[in-house]
Amino acid sequence: MNQKNTSLITMVRAAVELDYPIKRGDKEIKTIELRKPRAGEMRGLSLTDVLQMEFNALNRLLPRITNPALTEAEIMNLDPADLLQIGSEVTSFLLSKKMRGEMNEDVYQSS
């Protein structure tokens, strides 16, 4: 793998620190790492539903892109604030560079 590919992989990950850690056996998961989904990992999902952070779409997608891999039961038991944080990261992965730039520009201009 060349240097360019390595830096690209680094850019498509995000870590979310949970306000309410997940208990898995005798372990506590305090941080979830998310990876930008590839097209195949979006199979069976509506992009619109994912962008709108629709629960059922996130519940199907998150086990595919989280580390440690979350189970559907763990996702169902997440605190809503943690789910919102995770969902926000997922939606940011789906925006193009141009859209992210335009959004940042709009926020800056409206301030």
Image (cartoon, helix red, strand yellow):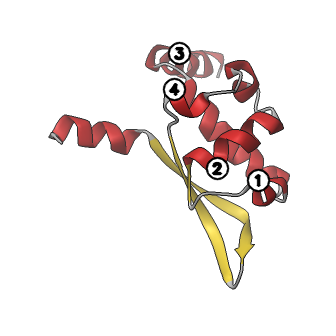
Tag of residue 39: 4
x, y percent for residue 8: 31, 36
Query: Within 10 Å of the Cα at label 1, are there few (<14), some (14-19), or many (20+) other Cα atoms?
Result: some
C-alpha span from label 3 to label 4: 19 Å
First along the sequence among labels 3 and 4? 4
Query: Within 10 Å of the Cα at label 3, are there few (<14), some (14-19), or many (20+) other Cα atoms?
Result: few
Dot 1 and dot 2 residues touching (CB under 8 Å)? yes
Query: Within 10 Å of the Cα at label 2, are there few (<14), some (14-19), or many (20+) other Cα atoms?
Result: some
Residue type pointed to by label 2: Pro
Which quadrant, please, contains the C terminus?
Answer: top right
C-alpha span from label 3 to label 2: 26 Å
Kindly identify the residue that appears in the image at 70 percent across and 25 percent down.
51
- Tag 4 secondary structure: helix
- Tag 3 secondary structure: helix
First along the sequence among labels 3 and 2? 2
Residue type pointed to by label 4: Ala
Residue type pointed to by label 1: Glu
Residues 42 and 18: in front is: 42
Dot 2 and dot 4 residues touching (CB under 8 Å)? no
x, y percent for residue 35: 50, 44
| 104 horizontally vs 18: left or right | left
Residue under numbered circle 3: 99
Kindly identify the residue that appears in the image at 71 percent across and 57 percent down.
71
x, y percent for residue 22: 73, 69
Residue under numbered circle 2: 63
| 8 horizontally vs 48: left or right | left
